[in-house]
């Protein structure tokens, strides 16, 4: 299974920052990478809120795999230090 070299909270925060700046979403910048690099930390609380909501799998997710493993993985993501 592929693994990311960035914590999940950071990846979600970067997506949220990208949505703010990128012309591929709500922003106007066709190349927003530098802005995202500077601003993603401003979206960490939103990213944490997303993960808190995602801790519990829905019925389809639970039917597709191990719900306890999912919860454990999300809890691990929430516990990561971003410093």
Image (spheres, grey):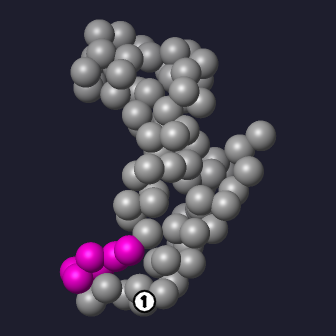
Asked if residue 20 shows in the view, the reply is yes
Please identify the residue farthest to the left as the structure is shown.
60
Give me the residue at 52% from left, 40% from top.
Answer: 45
Image quarter where the C terminus lies is top right
Q: Nearer the viewer, residue 52 or 21?
A: 52
Side of 13 where 29 appears, left or right? left
4 versus 44 height, above or below: below
Residue 37 forms part of the magenta stretch: no
Q: Nearer the viewer, residue 56 or 21?
A: 56
In the rendering, at what x and y percent does residue 35 appear? 52, 15
Please identify the residue farthest to the right as the structure is shown.
83
Image quarter where the N terminus lies is bottom right
Give me the residue at 59% from left, 30% from top.
Answer: 41
In the rendering, at what x and y percent does residue 17 appear? 44, 27
Q: Which residues are magenta?
A: 56-61
Asked if residue 30 shows in the view, the reply is no
Give me the residue at 35% from left, 10% from top.
Answer: 29
14 versus 70 height, above or below: above
Side of 51 where 58 appears, left or right? left
Choose top left, top right, bottom left or bottom right for residue 32. top left
Q: Nearer the viewer, residue 33 or 44?
A: 44
52 versus 27 height, above or below: below
In the rendering, at what x and y percent does residue 70 appear? 47, 78
In the rendering, at what x and y percent does residue 20 appear? 36, 22
Residue marked by disc 1: 66
Element carrying mark 1:
loop
Please identify the residue farthest to the top as the structure is shown.
28
């Amino acid at each position: 299974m592929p693994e990311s070299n960035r914590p999940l909270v950071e990846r979600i925060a970067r997506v949220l920052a990208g949505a703010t700046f990128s012309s591929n979403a709500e922003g106007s910048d066709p190349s927003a990478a530098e802005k995202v690099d500077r601003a993603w930390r401003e979206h960490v609380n939103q990213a944490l809120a997303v993960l808190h909501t995602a801790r519990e799998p829905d019925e389809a997710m639970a039917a597709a795999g191990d719900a306890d493993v999912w919860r454990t993985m999300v809890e691990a993501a929430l516990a990561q230090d971003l410093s």
